[in-house]
Amino acid sequence: MHHLRHIYGTMLQRRPVQFKTPVLRLLATMSALVVVGAFSLPATSFGASSPAVVVKMSDKPPKFIPETVTIKAGQTVQWVNNAKTLHSVDGDPTMALKPSDVSLPSGAKSFDSGFMKPDMTWEYTFKVPGTYKYTCVPHEKDGMNGEVIVK
């Protein structure tokens, strides 16, 4: 224990580093500010964009809330499964029971969230303008369909 007191006592008695030139002092200060600033920035400042719209998924009745949203091309929609059952977001016509439940604008790629457990989120960025009709595969028969209109 005595040797720890000696080590810590020596560290506490040291004088701060003195930089001889103003340029070195400036560089040291700027470096410290960059390090501190990097740890204090929110994660969104590093390129992640927040969604333009959040769509919730309910159980009783199974539905997307809201069922229709309007966004601009290049914006992102986030779906949140705040229900107690599995849900999905499917904009893939080959997965729909009824072809009229899912449709995409010409040139748009199909999308599929996979099965989303309760409390999961999923995002999709819409790049092609037009109307996207999508469904929840486990609840399509219950009429759980949604629509994204991209301007």
Image: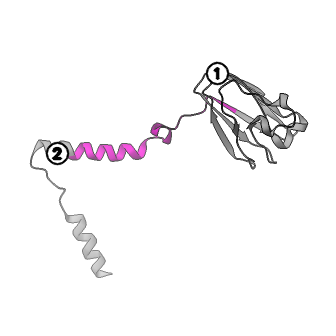
- Which element carries disc 2, helix, strand or loop? helix
Neighbours of disc 1 within 10 Å: few (<14), some (14-19), many (20+)? some
41 displayed left or right of 105: left
Residue at disc 1, secondary structure: loop
Left or right: 133 as drawn, with respect to 77: right
View extreme (left): residue: 20
Please state which of residues 88 and 112 is positioned toward the viewer in this rendering.
Answer: 112
Res 57 → quadrant: top right
Q: Which quadrant of the figure contains the C terminus? A: top right
- 72 relative position to 34: left or right: right
Q: Which percent across, then down, holds residue 98?
A: 87, 33
**Residue occupying the far right of the picture:** 141
Q: Which percent across, then down, holds residue 144? A: 84, 34
Q: Is residue 82 left or right of residue 100?
A: left
Amino acid type of the residue tagged 1 in the rendering = Pro
Q: Looking at this view, is 20 or 47 the one in front?
A: 47
Residue plotted at (25% across, 42% down) = 30
* Magenta run includes residue 46: yes
From the image, give the main secondary structure of the stretch colored magenta.
Answer: helix
Residue type at mark 2: give it: Arg
Residue 19 in percent (x, y) is at 13, 50
Mark-to-mark CA distance, 1 and 2 = 53 Å
Circle 2 residues within 10 Å: few <14, some 14–19, many ≥20: some
Q: Which residue is mark 1?
A: 129
Residue 25 numbered tag: 2
Where is residue 126, by image quadrant? Answer: top right
> In the image, which residues are magenta?
28-54
Query: Which mark is first along the chain, 2 or 1?
Result: 2
Asked where in the image residue 145 lies, by quadrant, the reply is top right
Rendered residue at 80%/48% (across/down): 86
The percent coordinates of residue 8 (x first, y second) are: 28, 70
